Amino acid sequence: MRMWGWSIEVIDPMPEKCVIVVYPHTSNWDFPVGLLTKWATGLSATRDALRYAGKTSLFVWPWGWFFRAVGGVPVDRTGGSGFSEQMAVRFASEPRMRFVIAPEGTRSYRDHVRSSFYYVAKAANVPIVLGTFDFENKRVRISELFTPSDDVDADLLRIDAFYRSIAPARGLGHTPANAAPWKFAKRN
């Protein structure tokens, strides 16, 4: 990462159990930057229980073994899969678990973020750590500890304020125009 001119800032100490949000997810480059960050900081799937969510289609032949080996957890994104509850059970059964998730769930623009990161943290009773890849300044920042309250709207405003406070002029992520606003989809 240093060879490419990137700096890394990671909260220390990292909570033993947490949901790590990396926002925005706007490019395929997010995965290699995240993986290199993981290796540069010495975090591993086995020792540090660092896991990440990825779409189910990533976990098939020929690369499925690789994505699992580097901490991947397949996610069925069709909705109604009980993902939050499944992850809460996993958090409860593990002595240490740090779960990385991109709240948009896609690299393309969408008009909201997915709520799973929030409800996984609430169901598992773990904090959220806010992070970003600032491509403009070549900086990885995983630094803001956030405990969800019982006021979803206030929490989303607080998360949005954090990301606005650290965003460079052009915006965060590889393609800032694809960053979703900090709101959840309206439920019918």
Image (cartoon, grey):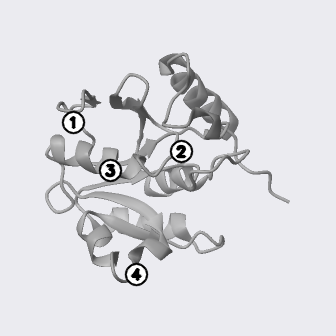
| Residue to which mark 4 is pinned | 60
Q: SS of the residue at dot 1?
A: loop
Tell me the SS state at disc 3: helix
Q: Residue shown at 64%/28% (left/top)?
A: 157
Q: Residue at x 56, y 31 (%)?
A: 159
Which amino acid does the dot numbered 3 rest on?
Answer: Pro
Q: Nearer the viewer, residue 166 or 116?
A: 166
Write down the residue under mark 1. Answer: 1
Q: Amino acid at mark 2?
A: Thr
Q: Residue furthest right?
A: 188
Locate residue 130 relative to residue 4 in the image: left or right: right
Q: Earlier in the sequence, mark 3 or mark 1?
A: 1
Q: Are marks 1 and 4 in contact (CB under 8 Å)?
A: no
The quarter holding residue 63 reads bottom left
Viewport quadrant of the N terminus: top left
Depth order, front residue of 169/38: 169
Disc 4 marks a residue whose amino acid type is Val
The answer to whether 160 appears left or right of 38 in the picture is right
Q: Which residue is mark 3?
A: 32
Q: CA distance from mark 1 to mark 4?
A: 29 Å
The percent coordinates of residue 103 (x first, y second) are: 55, 49
User: Mark 3, residues whose alpha carbon is within 10 Å: few (<14), some, or many (≥20)?
Assistant: few
Of labels 1 and 4, earlier in sequence is: 1
Circle 1: residue type: Met
Q: N-terminal of the two: label 1 or label 2? A: 1
